Image (tube, coloured by chain):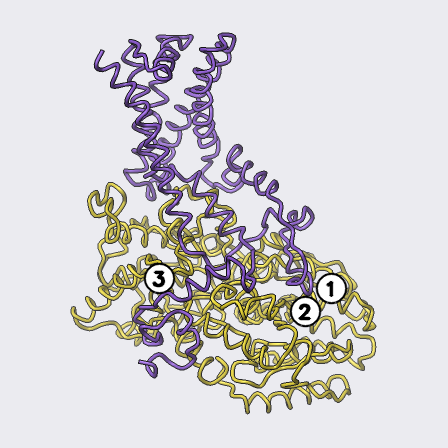
Chain colours: A purple, B yellow
């Protein structure tokens, strides 16, 4: 009974810890300094025509006086094509990682959906068949994708060079979760024990379930806590790399909030030691120095 | 294949033997050429003094440190710079993109074959976009992160940091053109080209080490003498007289090129290298602007006649200094906007990258900065000048400057111009537009010619562009057919000029190159003779 209570507490603790840790990481990303403009075209929020060939507002004269297009929907579409279809990996990866990577990612998406369906099935029993189908697909795709990527990375000499033990650890971790999921399904084809565990979690009523089901959920909980510290958090990072850097074509306007942010950053002190850098000055002071740093020192 | 497997730990290997040895047989083939030019090797007398331990090439004329203490000082300075690279005050400019790229690269290698240097070299491991990033990442993890300090090689932090590692990393940062084609294909938005630039920045801003053409003879000379060419304001005025003579000689027109004209609509800034190497370029602008009635001026103020901003390749402080001076000159002249001539990196520096290192009073709406290409397109399309495409009745291909297309999204104006002024359809390179390949001179390489670096550029980084040019003209390769490569960028022109000479493309295939404005002026109906000279120096 004590262990059953532990699994309830660990389930909720992992949810809260995941949310807290993810929020902390997102806060850290969001409060990083404003990057210099460093966009790469095509930028998806451009007009449909320009987006097609990678054009920008800078193809016009007097563009600083014109209104600029901004399509959040187009950004979502572009991001979606990457998240759900892994477009860039499919088109450009020379090591043919795409089928395995796609399978692993869809395994994760379906796993999250499956957990939701387990809860929903408590209220709507008619969803059982769908829950089983989604669960089996999630485990099969996730396990196949993770194992496939491990094999690819281990057997291709060039991929192996770049794969650190921690990369294998991440993939083995995922393969273990999905593998346990598949194993638990073999012992419980309708996922009734999984549903019982989720039901117990939601109602705070510990329910005895088989060791393999407990093991899968405990592993999943550890994974949820570990993930924000790992590279597997890259799905959140994409917002900052794409939307806040590679697609950020917003030029500064005097008096704007961006201008205030830039002014704050220009007041930071430069302490680089190069002979042409004037020491102890702020960025704004230093860029006004046009003669060599030695003269200023 | 002569390539030997390389492990990351090899980067720390002592001795002068290069980490990788290039062989002509490994490079991509250029089919129309009967013979591949041989790769250069360092002169024997250099080997004693300079370090060639990455791949047998170098642009750094810094003598190798002689004592362990000197070597250790460099390593310690590198570590100090590494800390500053990840410090929000010292590197606010690129911290976000750098940190996320360092921490979240999945090492999937999707970017590998986007890189023309990696492909052209026959897939040399050290030129893979992720290789140098991974070296920096492993050092950074080992020395700057808790997981790296505690777990070491389990998280990949397994490279010894010594003089050899530091020097090879410096060299590696100058084997990337920073064209950022690899960034386009990354599923996570990781920017390996930025990492190369950040390594350069660490060396420049902390140790004062950079290729001599970029820092000592580059930004330093630019800020102190007025131009990286060494041209002073007085020298610039003399050069303008020469430009006016060229105009008169080629067109019969007497044009006074406006200088320091207060209140003009446009301040036109050229790459000053144009005045020396391709004076017909700035002359073409003056002919065209004069004929179209454009109200413009050049500036003879210090820096006002040289649009280059080498800081964009390696140093944020120098980037800000040059950009600020350019913008202040425009403000003092009271012009409505700055228009940048045919120089790709100068486009990106002043119109895009430097935007956020300047205070609001110099922001883009206050002092607009634009590319010359939309203005040229508008002039051509306006009908203000009579243009006859039959004057340009020869095969034309277009080299896209990475800075202009991929990094600014200016793709269509140059194509609309060529369509309007050429008799034959534009022969697009494959790929082109934002997917173009760099000319091989990007990131400063076009002007780097210390020691044997230009051998590397011509044979490796420019090789893919040469292949593209040959492919674009494959059905008209005979030397009797004049063919024109449009390169609306000074550095691209420099790289292509050198590649044409290196591979003998003019004599063997009749391939020549030049600016876009030259081509427009060549189509003007009221000029007495063709403007383009097909063989000016041969």
Give the residue number, with chain letter if any, for mark 1.
Answer: B417
Spatial CA distance of label 2 from label 3 is: 42 Å
Residue A99 lies, in percent from the top left, at 48, 30
Callout count: 3
Looking at the image, residue A275 sits to the left or right of residue B180; the answer is left
Chain letter belonging to callout 3? B
Give the structural element (helix, strand or loop) at label 3.
Answer: loop
How busy is the neighbourhood of tag 1: few (under 14 within 10 Å), some, or many (20 plus)?
Answer: many
From the image, state whether disc 1 or disc 3 is nearer to you.
Answer: 3
Residue A186 lies, in percent from the top left, at 37, 10
Give the residue number, with chain letter if any, for mark 2.
Answer: B516
**Vertical order, B397 against B148 (above or below):** below
Q: Residue at x 32, y 29 (%)?
A: A223
State the residue in front, A45 or A67.
A67
Chain letter belonging to callout 2? B
**Vertical order, B291 against A64 (above or below):** below
Spatial CA distance of label 2 from label 1 is: 9 Å
How busy is the neighbourhood of tag 2: few (under 14 within 10 Å), some, or many (20 plus)?
Answer: many
The part of the image, by quadrant, that contains residue A234 is top left
Label 2 with label 3: CB-CB less than 8 Å: no
Q: Are marks 2 and 3 on the same chain?
A: yes
Q: Residue at x 52, y 49 (%)?
A: B184
Q: Residue at x 71, y 88 (%)?
A: B256
Residue extending furthest front?
A: A255
Label 2 with label 1: CB-CB less than 8 Å: yes
Earlier residue among tags 2 and 1? 1
Disc assigned to residue B89? 3
Spatial CA distance of label 1 from label 3 is: 45 Å
State the residue in front, A297 or B304.
A297
């Amino acid at each position: 009974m004590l262990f059953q209570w532990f699994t309830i507490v660990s389930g909720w603790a992992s949810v809260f810890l995941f949310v807290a840790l993810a929020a902390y990481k997102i806060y850290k990303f969001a409060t990083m300094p404003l990057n210099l403009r460093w966009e790469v075209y095509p930028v998806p929020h451009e007009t449909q025509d320009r987006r097609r060939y990678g054009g920008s507002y800078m193809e016009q004269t007097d563009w600083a006086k014109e209104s600029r297009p901004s399509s959040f929907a187009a950004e979502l579409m572009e991001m979606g094509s990457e998240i759900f279809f892994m477009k860039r990996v499919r088109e450009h990866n020379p090591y043919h990682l795409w089928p395995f990577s796609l399978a692993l990612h869809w395994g994760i998406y379906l796993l999250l959906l499956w957990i939701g369906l387990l809860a929903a099935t408590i209220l709507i029993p008619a969803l059982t068949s769908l829950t089983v189908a989604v669960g089996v697909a999630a485990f099969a795709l996730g396990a196949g994708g993770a194992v496939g990527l491990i094999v690819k990375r281990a057997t291709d000499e060039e991929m192996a060079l770049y794969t650190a033990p921690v990369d294998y650890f991440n993939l083995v971790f995922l393969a273990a979760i999905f593998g346990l999921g598949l194993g638990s399904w073999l012992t419980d084809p309708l996922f009734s024990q999984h549903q019982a565990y989720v039901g117990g979690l939601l109602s705070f009523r510990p329910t005895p379930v088989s060791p393999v089901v407990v093991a899968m959920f405990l592993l999943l909980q550890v994974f949820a806590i570990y993930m924000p510290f790992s590279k597997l958090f890259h799905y959140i990072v994409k917002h900052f790399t794409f939307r806040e850097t590679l697609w950020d074509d917003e030029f500064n306007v005097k008096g704007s909030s961006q201008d205030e942010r830039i002014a704050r950053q220009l007041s930071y002190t430069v302490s680089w030691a190069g002979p042409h850098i004037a020491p102890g000055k702020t960025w704004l002071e230093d860029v006004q120095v046009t003669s060599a740093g030695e003269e200023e020192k | 294949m002569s390539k030997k497997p390389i492990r990351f730990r090899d980067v720390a290997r002592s001795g002068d033997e290069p980490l990788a040895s290039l062989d002509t047989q490994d490079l991509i083939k250029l089919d129309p050429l009967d013979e591949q030019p041989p790769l250069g090797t360092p002169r024997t007398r250099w080997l004693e003094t300079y370090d060639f331990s990455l791949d047998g090439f170098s642009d750094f004329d810094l003598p190798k440190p002689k004592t362990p203490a000197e070597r250790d000082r460099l390593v310690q300075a590198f570590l100090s710079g590494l800390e500053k690279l990840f410090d929000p005050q010292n590197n606010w400019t690129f911290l976000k993109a750098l940190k996320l790229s360092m921490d979240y690269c999945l090492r999937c290698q999707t970017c590998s074959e986007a890189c023309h240097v990696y492909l052209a070299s026959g897939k040399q491991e050290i030129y893979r976009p992720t290789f140098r990033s991974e070296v920096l990442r492993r050092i950074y993890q080992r020395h700057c992160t808790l997981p790296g300090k505690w777990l070491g090689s389990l998280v990949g932090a397994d490279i010894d940091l010594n003089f050899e590692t530091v020097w090879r990393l410096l060299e590696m940062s100058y084997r990337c053109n920073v064209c950022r084609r690899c960034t386009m294909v990354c599923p996570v938005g990781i920017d390996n080209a930025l990492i190369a630039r950040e390594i350069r920045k660490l060396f420049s801003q902390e140790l004062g080490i950079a290729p001599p053409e970029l820092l000592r003879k580059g930004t330093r000379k630019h800020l102190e003498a007025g131009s990286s060419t060494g041209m002073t304001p007085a020298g610039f005025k003399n050069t303008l007289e020469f430009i006016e003579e060229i105009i008169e000689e080629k067109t019969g027109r007497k044009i006074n090129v406006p200088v320091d004209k207060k209140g003009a609509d446009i301040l036109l800034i050229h790459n000053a290298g144009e005045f020396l190497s391709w004076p017909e370029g700035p002359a073409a602008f003056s002919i065209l602007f004069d004929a179209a009635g454009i109200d413009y001026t050049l500036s003879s103020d210090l820096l006002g006649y040289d649009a280059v901003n080498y800081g964009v390749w390696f140093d944020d402080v120098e980037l800000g200094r040059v950009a600020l001076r350019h913008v202040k000159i425009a403000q003092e002249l009271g012009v409505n906007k700055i228009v940048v001539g045919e120089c790709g990196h100068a486009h990106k520096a002043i119109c895009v990258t430097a935007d956020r290192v300047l205070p609001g009073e110099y922001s883009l709406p206050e002092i607009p900065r634009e590319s010359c290409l939309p203005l040229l397109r508008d002039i051509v399309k306006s009908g203000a000048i009579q243009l006859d495409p039959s004057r340009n009745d020869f095969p034309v291909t277009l080299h896209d400057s990475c800075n202009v297309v991929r990094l600014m999204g200016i793709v269509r104006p140059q194509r609309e111009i060529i369509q309007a002024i050429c008799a034959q359809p534009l022969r697009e390179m494959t790929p082109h537009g934002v997917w173009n390949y760099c000319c091989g001179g990007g990131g400063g390489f076009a002007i780097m010619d210390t020691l044997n670096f230009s051998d590397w550029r011509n044979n490796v980084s420019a090789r893919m562009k040469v292949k593209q040019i040959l492919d674009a003209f494959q059905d008209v390769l005979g030397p009797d057919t004049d063919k024109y490569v449009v390169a609306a960028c000074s550095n691209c022109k420099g790289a292509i000029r050198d590649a044409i000479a290196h591979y003998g493309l003019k004599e063997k295939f009749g391939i020549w190159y030049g600016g876009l404005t030259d081509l427009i002026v060549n189509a003007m109906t009221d000029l007495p003779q063709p403007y383009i000279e097909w063989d000016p120096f041969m």
